[in-house]
Amino acid sequence: MRPIVRSLSLPALAAVTALAASASSALAADAPSAINPHGFKVPTGTHRCELNRSIDVRSVAADQSTAVLGFDRKEYRMQAVVARSGALRYEDPSSGLVWLVIATKSMLLDTKNGRQLANECKT
C-alpha cells in the first residue's frame, strides 16, 4: 500500500509550518524542565530543619539551574542535575554536598562522608 501524498501550495505550507512552530514554542514554555519536572519554585530565605539546623537559601536562578546555599557558616554554589526521582537535586562536587528538594521539604547530604547534614527542612 502506497501512502497518499498531497502537495500543498507554498502559502499553505508556510501557514502550517508557522502554526507548528508556535504550538511547539507554547508547549516548551509550559513544559517543566528536565531538572524540575514538577515545576515548583524553591523559595529563598531560611529553611528550618530538624535538630535545630537551618539552610539559608540565598539565591536561586530563575530557571532553577543554580542555587547558592549557606550552611554551617559556609557558602555553597550548587548546580542542578537531573534526578530520576523527580526531586530537584543540586550538587556541589568540590564539597560533596547534595541538596534534595521536593515541593514541601528538603534535605542536605554530605556524600563524601555519607551522612545527612539537615533533614525535614521547611520554609
Image (cartoon, rainbow, N blue to C red):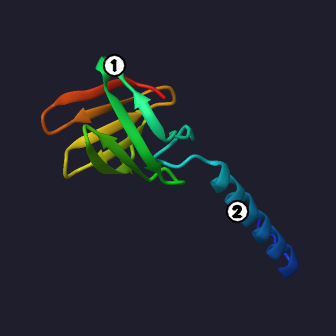
Residue 50: mark in rendering = 1
Residue 106 drawn above or below residue 56: above
Q: Nearer the viewer, residue 54 or 103?
A: 54
Q: Is residue 75 left or right of residue 15?
A: left
Q: Residue at x 45, y 49 (%)?
A: 59
Residue 71, compared with residue 95, is above or below; it is above
* Residues at circles 2 and 1 in contact by the CB criterion of under 8 Å: no
From where the camera sits, is residue 51 visible? Answer: yes
Q: Position of residue 112 (x, y in %)?
A: 14, 39
| Amino acid type indicated by mark 1 | Glu
* Residue 70 drawn at (x, y percent): 33, 43
- Quarter holding residue 119: top left
SS at badge 1: helix
Residue 55 x/y as whole percent: 36, 35
Reading the chain from its start, which is encountered first: label 2 or label 1?
2
Eye-nearest disc, 2 or 1: 1
Q: Amino acid at mark 2?
A: Arg
Query: Quadrant where the N terminus lies?
Result: bottom right
Residue at x-position 57% and y-position 41%: 39
Q: Is residue 79 left or right of residue 24?
A: left
Of 60 and 12, nearer the camera is 60
Dot 2 falls on a residue whose secondary structure is loop
Q: Is residue 86 visible?
A: no
Residue at position x 19%, y 37% in the image = 111
Relative side of 16 to 110, left or right: right
Against 10, residue 122 (above or below) is above
- Residue under pointer 2: 2
Distance of mark 2 from mark 1, alpha carbons? Answer: 67 Å
Q: Nearer the viewer, residue 44 or 20?
A: 44
**Residue density around tag 2, few if under 14, some if 14–19, many if 20 or more, within 10 Å:** few
